[in-house]
Image: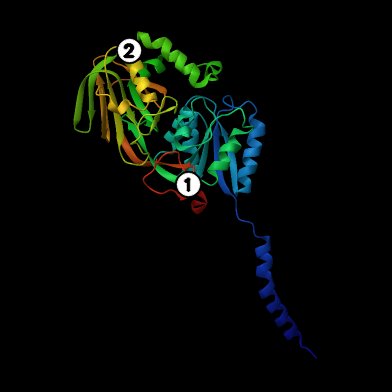
Amino acid sequence: MISLSRIWGRWAIIQAQVVPYVLLLRYRPMPKQAALIYNPNAGIRDWSAQLAQFRHFWAAKGWTVDLRPTKYPGHATTLAATLVDEGFPLVFAAGGDGTLNEVANGLAGTDVIMAPLPVGTANSFAKEIGLPVRSLLQENRLLAVSEVLATGRVYAMDLGRCDDGRYWLLWASTGADGFIIDQIEPRSRRFKRLGTVGYAAKFLFFLPSFTGIHGRVTVDDQVVEGDFLQVMVSNCQRYAGGEFILNRRGQLDDGLFEVWIVRGKRWPMLVRYTIEVALDSHDLDPNIDVLAGTRVVVETDEPAPYHLDAEPAGKTPLACTLQPGALRILAPATTPTPLFKRAGVPLGALA
């Protein structure tokens, strides 16, 4: 006869062997948290349908996506800073270069990753890193970009920081483009739909009224003084809405600005320079100086408008300092040109 104590002993052994496997079958990894900052009034006509597919896609990858729509200019910066405080490791930013700039200003100097979703007009940053930009053939632009980012890598890129505390990703520039952007911004939604073509038309319309600037450019301990058509502090390779590669030496994590100083007084010379850039012969022009450094100050005899990432930002003097590795970004595993000196880390390895 089997004793009651032996029965209980065997039952305890069975429990010890079986229960862990039952718990394992019931276990589901906790979803990782991400957030999406987007402007519901721009870029996409049917946000609800695209957002549903977008969230479903990332849910299948183990991410829940919290939605944070913007309500006013500059709100994306506030939302991004709030998400940092709430502990979100990944923030999607849906918009154009202006939206990315705002989100970057909220995330700069933190470990939170920014994932760009290009649904703006020019999408220069997206073109820089090789993301698919808006196309009539894409039924869901958020989904098209997500398919690339899901296998992407996380990099730490440099940022520019103005003395007033504002960060920028791509450029800080004064001269012809600062003057034109100051004239045409803010643009209407209808005009933005014309994209780069509309911008180019406005550029040609206002260009004859630009008379150049006279001033001084200081890059670290190098000083250049004279008449300039444009002074651009670059943190990237592309320019003009991402259509042209201007700065082939630029990398997003090389710890240096490249400062392009275009000499001249008359606007027709700028047309010549534009043609040279399109033909990739601008490096040979003796009227174009390129300096590298980490601290740039642009002073002009008369206050001249400047822009940060193609958004009007004030008038000279312009002073900015490079902030190495200040922003973590999610980018495609392979970029169109060598943009990073350091190897990125797969998103999955950080989750």
Residue on which the image places disc 2? 267
Q: Image height check: is 331 above or below 285? A: below
Amino acid marked by disc 1: Arg
In this rendering, position of residue 152 left or right of residue 62:
left
The quarter of the displayed image where residue 301 is located: top left
Q: Image height check: is 3 above or below 245? A: below
Extreme residue toward the right, this view: 1
Seen from the viewer's position, the closer of residues 87 and 169 is: 169
* Residue pictured at 61% horizontal, 27% vertical: 136
Residue 153 - label: 1
Seen from the viewer's position, the closer of residues 31 and 198 is: 198
Residue 129 - label: none
Q: Position of residue 32 (x, y in %)?
A: 56, 49
> For the N terminus, which image quadrant?
bottom right
The quarter of the displayed image where residue 36 is located: top right
Q: Position of residue 328 (x, y in %)?
A: 43, 43
The quarter of the displayed image where residue 325 is located: top left
Crowding at dot 2, Cα within 10 Å, few <14 / some 14-19 / many 20+, comes out as some
Residue 286 in view here = yes
In this rendering, position of residue 296 left or right of residue 59:
left
Residue 186 in view here = no
* Inter-mark Cα distance, 1 to 2: 42 Å
Extreme residue toward the top, this view: 209
Q: Secondary structure beneath disc 2? A: helix
Q: Position of residue 39 (x, y in %)?
A: 55, 28
